[in-house]
Amino acid sequence: MKKKNDYDKQIKNGKENIGKCIEMKKFNEEEKENNKCKNCGEQASYFSDENNSWLCEDCRSIEDGLDKLANKIEKKLSKRVYSFDLNELINCLSKDEIYNIARNLGVNKISGLNKEKLIEILLKEYKNLVKKRALFFDEERYKILKSYVDCKGVKLFDNIDEEEADKSAYFIQQGMLFPTVKDGVSIFLMPEIVQALIKERNNIEYRRVIKFNSEIVNIFRAMNKVYGILKLKDAKEIIERYLNIENCELEELIREATYYYNEYREEGIFIVNNEIDNFEELLKDIDTEKDLSYAMISKEELLNMLEENWVYNSKAGKTFYKEFTNMFRVDRDMLIAIMEDLIFDVQENEPKDAVDKMIELINIENDEARYVASSMMNKFVKKIRLWRYKGSTTNDIKSNVVSLKANKDIKRNDPCPCGSLKKYKKCCGKDEKVINLLE
């Protein structure tokens, strides 16, 4: 689960903590000699009376920044109203906030308009735009909005769990929820017009729509974990393996899920996993193997990847966990974290490099123990689905080597069967090494 952003943390602290400055005292070298920063462990320079703790220079600056942010948020929220009338809720916002809501909902031709005209157009088009947007919701988004209707349009921020609070930004940015403060308590409000629209959709027909949307969105989210980067055209072809999506507005569904789940992003014609920083480099790796198809994965395996601790619950994960804990005494959560780190590390590095890095990190000193741990991790990472292999594992690629050699002669310009993504003549065929490799 993602941590809340600073905005959320400051709201949750309530009005009573907003605006308090941390009193800092700077100490000389002798006084601070044996004191460590509570946040990073570095040598501390300041003592906070407010938190009764030591801070280094950098963390002190961060604390000051958060304090200023808290003041800014409090000032902004103090201008908000407690109302379920959309007109009143919109009118107390800044012009930029109104513009962003209008743009996110899809209001056209609003550049350069003054605040009054923006409000006029937004209020005029709001109902139809929200109705249209609701057609692209999945079950999770509908469930959150329905929970506001059940609470008569109000939720205390303190009663919202971290995940929902994190995702509430999606609804705030589209003017379906409004944060405010009443009697020193932070709350979220849903306008009466949105409550009415959600009530109208509490029927079997709409539930069928959002159930179908959920299937598509969840399959795509899982595909994004497996393949890392996809063209929309390729995504559509893969989804068609599992569902009939004729007449489905797939692009709009995926785009809306982009904003809500924040797991992937659009980069031109590509949809890219947010864990990938340099997607151009990954594209080069993928493009060197033109004949490699996207791995065929069962719908069940895909959807399991959306579950908590999916790595641990996978077949490869369970095998690794059992073998590792039979040899080493290790905390369960720590081992799961190691597995999850390896999942991402091996996407950017060769399996051996990813394993060596992890072995160094966990600091196993005994040579024999290092060898055993390394062997187990290497066995595990070879079963991980890799972005550069379009969802195939290292084991899958290597198994194809034997198949290719058995079924045809390898020509110099063919892809090398070892899975290096190079041409045979520039890889294993350089010195006719293929026989030694396959043996």
Image (cartoon, rainbow, N blue to C red):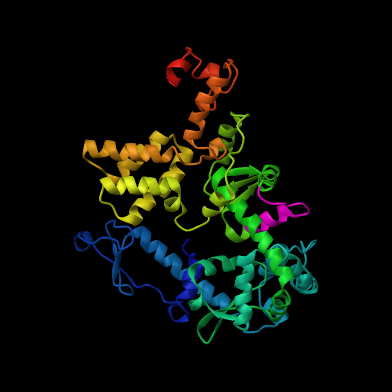
Looking at the figure, which quarter contains the C terminus? top left
Q: Residue 411's image quarter?
A: top right
257 drawn magenta: yes
Residue farthest along the bottom direction in this orientation:
183
Q: Position of residue 353 (x, y in %)?
A: 39, 35
Residue farthest along the top direction in this orientation:
431
Residue 319 falls left or right of residue 268: left
Q: Position of residue 30 (x, y in %)?
A: 19, 60
Determine if residue 96 is in view: yes
For the residue pair 117 and 23, the one nearer the viewer reads as 117
Residue 371 falls left or right of residue 222: left
Determine if residue 99 is in view: no
For the magenta stretch, what is the residue range?
242-258
Say how many tags the image has. 0
The residue under the point 54% across, 48% down is 225
Say above or below: 208 vs 262: below
Q: Position of residue 350 (x, y in %)?
A: 44, 34
Say above or below: 146 vs 396: below
The residue under the point 40% across, 49% down is 318
The residue under the point 43% across, 78% down is 17
